[in-house]
Amino acid sequence: MHLRSGVGVIELTVWLGQDPSDRHWGCPIREHWGLTAHQQLSPALQEKLAFTATATGSYAEAAALAAKWGSPVEDSTVRALVQRHGAQAEAQQQQRLTQPPTETEPTRAAAAVAVLMVDGWLVRHRGPGWGKKKPPQPPVEWHELKTGVFYRHDQAAQTAGGRGLLANKTVVSWQGEPVELSRRLHWEALRGGLGRARATLVVADGATWIWKMVADRWRGAIEVLDFYHASQHLWELGRAVVGESAAAAWVEPRWHRLRHGKERALLAEIAGLAVPRGTRGAVVRREQNYFAGHAARMAYATIRARGWPIGSGAVESACRQRQCRFKRPGQFWTAAGVRNLCALEEARRNNHWDELWTTA
């Protein structure tokens, strides 16, 4: 038997025979290592390639890097490897979700606050009309990949230059119903110490599905509307009320009031604005509804006084990192392709990697 390894091709003399327990023919050492009949990559090389695939921007980049460290493979081989082991990682995660999580640091002091952040972004998929001439159905579709982040606030710090830094964070993603994202994120959060935290803080944008999910899964958590998104809506309102040229003079003092503890007076002012006619009036009504719907999530001065975040930068960063992998030029995904790569990447990021390869 010949196996490609990280140090070249290895020739092994192995047994081939019939298993007396079920009478099937096979190679015991291949079965023990989890290799298929014609698989030629050693388990150690498979792990190395899979890890590289989760840390680079494409399968082609992973193959190029593998060639540099002496194990040339085709990018199609890397892709097939990711799909196979990604499916195993997903199956393991599904199994873990059926069991209560064990906290990774049970002797650590309880955190003052556990932070959850959620967002969503679109991935380009091959649609039902992909590869067909003049298809009746679209060849390309966009599907939302929902992403959640968990960290304890004691894991947050700053660099010498004042830049925010997280010592560690858990990142979970799901393409489908929000309830499944919340199930996975909650499990990982409990593993990270959510259950013993003295308070839970959720920071997100204004997406309706997020706050419905929060009410269902983390009822009683302190809810904060991402300040950047609130600011965007304040600017939209200002442009509708006074026009583009005068918007800055109208928005900036109100932005300051929103940020520094005068949100109740500002919200009352917004609710009482006269609604003009036409498209500007439609914008004013929309923004009035927006601010009224999130009024309880805008205590920014109070949250900042506790040293807690009012922005969802941690999940925005996680989304951007994923976008650098899933939204590259020319990339079109399938649901299985997204799920398997995400499962493998999350196994690495969330410290399940050794379990995956010990099993393999």
Image (cartoon, rainbow, N blue to C red):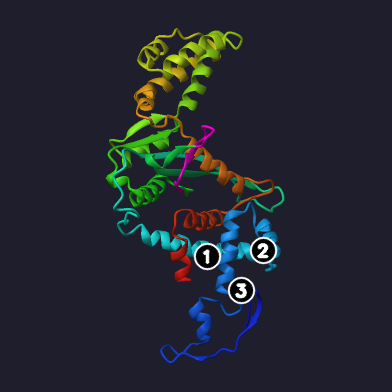
Q: CA distance from mark 3 to mark 1?
A: 13 Å
> Are discs 2 and 1 less than 8 Å apart at CB?
no
Residue 171: horizontal and vertical position, in percent? 46, 47
Q: Is residue 345 left or right of residue 202?
A: right
Q: Quadrant of the N terminus?
A: bottom right
Q: What residue do we see at 44% from left, 57% from top?
A: 351
Secondary structure of the residue carrying numbered label 2:
helix
Residue wearing tag 2: 66
Q: The disc labelled 3 sits on which kind of residue?
A: Leu
- Above or below for 348 versus 329: below
Using the image, tell me which numbered label, if any, was put on residue 85.
1
Q: Residues within 10 Å of mark 2 (few under 14, many from 20)?
A: many
Q: What residue do we see at 67% from left, 48% from top?
A: 135
**Snapshot quadrant of residue 213:** top left
Which of the two discs, 3 and 1, labels the residue nearer the N terminus?
3
Q: Is residue 142 visible?
A: no
Which is closer to the viewer, label 2 or label 3?
A: 2
Residue 28: horizontal and vertical position, in percent? 50, 85
- Above or below for 177 versus 281: below
Using the image, tell me which numbered label, if any, was put on residue 41.
3
Residue 319: horizontal and vertical position, in percent? 53, 42
Span colored in magenta: 159-172
**Snapshot quadrant of residue 70:** bottom right
Q: CA distance from mark 2 to mark 1?
A: 18 Å
Which is closer to the viewer, label 3 or label 1?
A: 3
Secondary structure of the residue carrying numbered label 1:
helix
Residue 278: horizontal and vertical position, in percent? 54, 12
